[in-house]
Amino acid sequence: MRIAWTLSINNIRRKLFRSFALILLVLCLSFAVFAGGMTIMSLQKGLNSYTARLGADVIVVPNNATSHGAVDDIFLQGITGNYYMSGRDIQKIYGIEGIEAISKQFYLTSAKASCCSSRVQIIGIDPETDFSIQPWIQDTYQGKMGMGDIIVGANINVPLSRTLRFYGNDYYVVAQLSRTGTGLDSAVYTNMATIKEMAANSVTLLDTDAFNSVNIDTAASAVLIKVKKNKDAETVADDINIHITKVEASSSRSMIASLMSGLSGVSRVIGILTGIIWILALVILMTVFMMISNERQKEFAILRISGASRKILFEIMSMEALLISSIGAVLGILIGLVIVVPSASILSGMLQLPLLMPGLMAMIMMIIGSFALALLATLIPALWSAHKMTKSETGLLLREDA
Amino acid sequence: MKLVAQKISRQFFRNSQNTNVFEAVKETDFVLEEGKISVIVGRSGGGKTTLSNMLCGLLMPSSGKVFLDECDLYALSDDERSKIRNQYIGIVPQGQTGLSSLTVLDNVLVPVMMYGDPETKKEEAMTLLYRLGIDDLANVYASDLSGGELRRMAIARALINNPEIIFADEPTGDLDDETTQIVFQLLRELADSGHSVLMVTHEKDALEYADHVFEMKNGVLL
């Protein structure tokens, strides 16, 4: 092993251009595998989180909601909008057959919040009836939201005073939710009484006509429905669409299905691209190692005449490949971490899909996997070229050299 | 240690279809005696290097056997044969042979690094370099040496494990007259102290130091 170590270290140090080119190649390879894998895992986790947070079988929004972006846009991208259905239409929903529970949500877009660089969506819920956001809130906050209390998503900056100002009033942040990877991370949550106070203040302060046609006290932006066990969510959504003309109902299954197909498409593309990069790198490394082995015939012949067995030659090639691939893989993964983790939200916006970084264990597994693949991609060509070289008799190598 | 070759020959194929056979060494018997210098002379392409490579365990004969004492060299595994080569056979190959990424001292210590601790042989390596007149280059990288310096470094490398048998293929090819005499003198001293030496050379001066002289012509040892 001593000869393998001495030669490998000296070869890497003395043949800088060759070492740098190989390290760069392995770096690109491990970066592609790590970044690709992390993106796929993050998308999968984001979708799981989104599905879990949705919590409803059917979602009903007013017809005009589509001009602001559909409800899944609000959930995914944090696209804000003020749209409301009247109390009369909501009452009609209660009359539809097959409904087990209904939860109302009231959306309000802040004009210019002191907390955020961009406008945020404020979501009002009734903690007594809510089955969509409340269970998630309870992971962080078990108390009861009082008048003027707000809970903020993971992306909202909370000042030291723990108050945020909306429409002239300060509201107290009682908790901050864990990250979901969706637009919900950029939202603010409060109870119905507080949001309706905000809405009323917005009319006074901004002279808006958003509430001209609706009664703030009875209106809602979205109605989330849980259907009875023996009922089909699609049928309930269809019934609502047939019987109530001013609203649009869609089953969460159909929303998730479209997301799923988007996710599987993106995952497939990333997976294929990562696979292509890996194979390409393997082919390039094979070629490079073959070229190097031709150049190293003389070196191998010297080692053979000095008493190196084939096993020792394999050790030398493996050691050099391991050192080069370890350096390249570590750098590639580090760059991957530096680029992928902070740019998750940008990527999520670009892909129009929820994206949530995997947990520590999953990330460690991904690091180990990327490292192993990079090592393998270097070791295979190195051992293959060593095998080809050691197949030739040393006497012939010396003749070819001479 | 006695090296005996029995009816060894070696054929090569001149084309990839393995149809054009060329016999580099025709059936030959050979004995390399202890404490003697045997010199093989002959024109280029006569089969001298092929014979030398077969004798030192680097090239498998097409037929015949090579015995080192009682041991059939080519019946051994690669690991066993390599270790024997490392410990009992010192080889100075034709051409300039140096590991360019190592210093001269490390190059000389390469055979020691394979199966032992190079620290124990550093002093011996320096003595050899001194005898060959390149001790001042010990810490210079092989890539920075001239042809003659590389050749002297290769001789030191071949001798570092104090091998009982020494093969030297054109050992003085790139050397000036003075260094050539130093190398021949060194080989003579080694033979006188019981080592067996086989030298392949064009150098007429070598004959003065030889105990046995053979001529290789068209694959036949005369």
Image: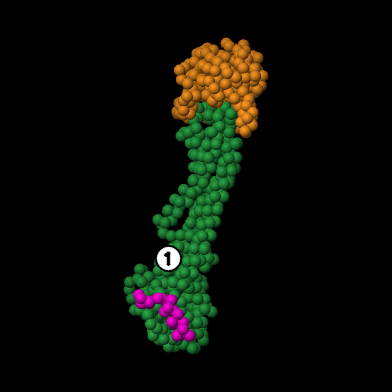
Chain colours: A green, B orange
- Considering depth in this image, is B137 or B164 the residue closer to the camera? B164
- Considering depth in this image, is B2 or A184 the residue closer to the camera? B2
Residue A394: x and y, percent? 55, 29
Report whether B118 appears left or right of A137. Answer: right
Residue A98 at least partly seen: yes
Residue carrying label 1: A48
Residue at mark 1: chain: A
Total labels: the figure holds 1
Position above or below: A259 against A109: above
Residue A317: x and y, percent? 51, 38
* Quadrant in the rendering for residue A16: top right
Q: Residue furthest front?
A: B19
Q: Residue furthest right?
A: B43
- Per the image, label 1 sits on a secondary structure element best described as helix
Position above or below: A311 against A132: above
Q: Residue at x 47, y 24 (%)?
A: B75
Q: Residue at x 42, y 79 (%)?
A: A236
Q: Residue at x 39, y 74 (%)?
A: A132
Residue A279: x and y, percent? 54, 50
Report whether B172 appears left or right of A63. Answer: right
Residue A166 at least partly seen: no
In the image, the segment drawn in magenta is A226-245
Residue A371: x and y, percent? 47, 49
- Considering depth in this image, is B5 or A164 the residue closer to the camera? B5
Q: Does the magenta run of residues contain A238?
A: yes
Position above or below: B183 against A4: above
Q: Residue at x 42, y 56 (%)?
A: A362
Q: Does the magenta run of residues contain B69?
A: no
Callout 1 amino acid = Asn
Mark 1 nearby-residue class (10 Å; few <14, some 14–19, many ≥20) = some
Q: Which quadrant of the rendered structure holds the C terminus of chain B?
A: top right
